[in-house]
Image (spheres, helix red, strand yellow):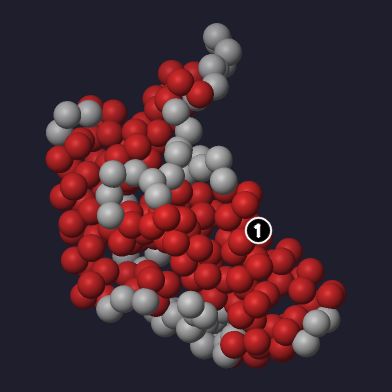
Amino acid sequence: MEPTDPPVTAPAPRTDLDADRALAARAASGDRAAQREVFARTKNAVHAVLYRILGSNREMEDLAQDSFVSIFRSIHGFRGESSLTTWCCTIATRVAWAHLERGRPTTTNLELVPEVPDGAPDAARVIAARLATQRVYAALDKLDPRLRVTFALAVLDERPLAEVAGMTGASVVAVKTRLWRARRELAKRAAKDPALSDYLGNIDRGGAR
């Protein structure tokens, strides 16, 4: 599905959006330099949104490549109603969502969390944080993709709910409902998992905007 521009609560300045439209038009026309600039400008954000949704997924690089294939196939439709980076992240979100719907992802096993050398500063804290992160993504693996994507974007990536709505093609009311359901499901699992409970408590103190 070819993406439409998502609404954002704080639009980029018009001059920036004009520059994004011009860059997208050049890339759509086959300008290789413009295509390289789009990739360079947005690659970190695309990787970040994929990681927020999927965690340490073995197919991450393939999914990033799929995202940029889709981005350049669709870039002629970029209208500049949101920033080019947000638009690219919307496409990456849809690639991640499609991956989730094809089958449950394989996140990194707890056993694969690397050892921290003895005497390293805050070694115990680093290990605890890594283990907690793995527990979160293990719990997210059990959620419906709609709930997982919403929770990842709104809570883990701290995006405004209106932006999450645009990126997922849903209303803000639907996003709020999905977020509530995701929190409820995760809370059930956290009741039996102290590490997950602590992690969720920490991120919830930041809240969704």
Residue drawn at (40%, 33%) of the image: 134
**82 relative to 199, above or below:** below
Residue 157 seen in the figure:
no
Front position in the image: 158 or 69: 69
Which amino acid type corresponds to the residue marked 1 in the rendered image?
Answer: Gln
**151 relative to 56, above or below:** below
Front position in the image: 182 or 194: 182
In the rendered image, the residue lying farthest to the front is 102
In the rendered image, the residue lying farthest to the top is 118
Residue 69 seen in the figure:
yes
Q: Callout 1 environment at 10 Å: few (<14), some (14 to 19), or many (20+)?
A: some
**185 relative to 165, above or below:** above
Element at badge 1?
helix
Front position in the image: 206 or 193: 193
Q: Position of residue 54 (x, y in %)?
A: 45, 49
Q: Position of residue 99 (x, y in %)?
A: 46, 56
Residue drawn at (61%, 80%) of the image: 74
In this rendering, position of residue 161 left or right of residue 96 = left
Q: Position of residue 191 (x, y in %)?
A: 15, 33
Residue drawn at (33%, 57%) of the image: 145
Identify the image quadrant of the C terminus: bottom left
Residue 83, quarter of picture:
bottom right
Q: Position of residue 178 (x, y in %)?
A: 23, 63
Question: How many numbered marks have been drawn onto this rendered protein structure?
Answer: 1
Residue drawn at (50%, 24%) of the image: 113
Front position in the image: 142 or 24: 142
**Residue underneath mark 1:** 65
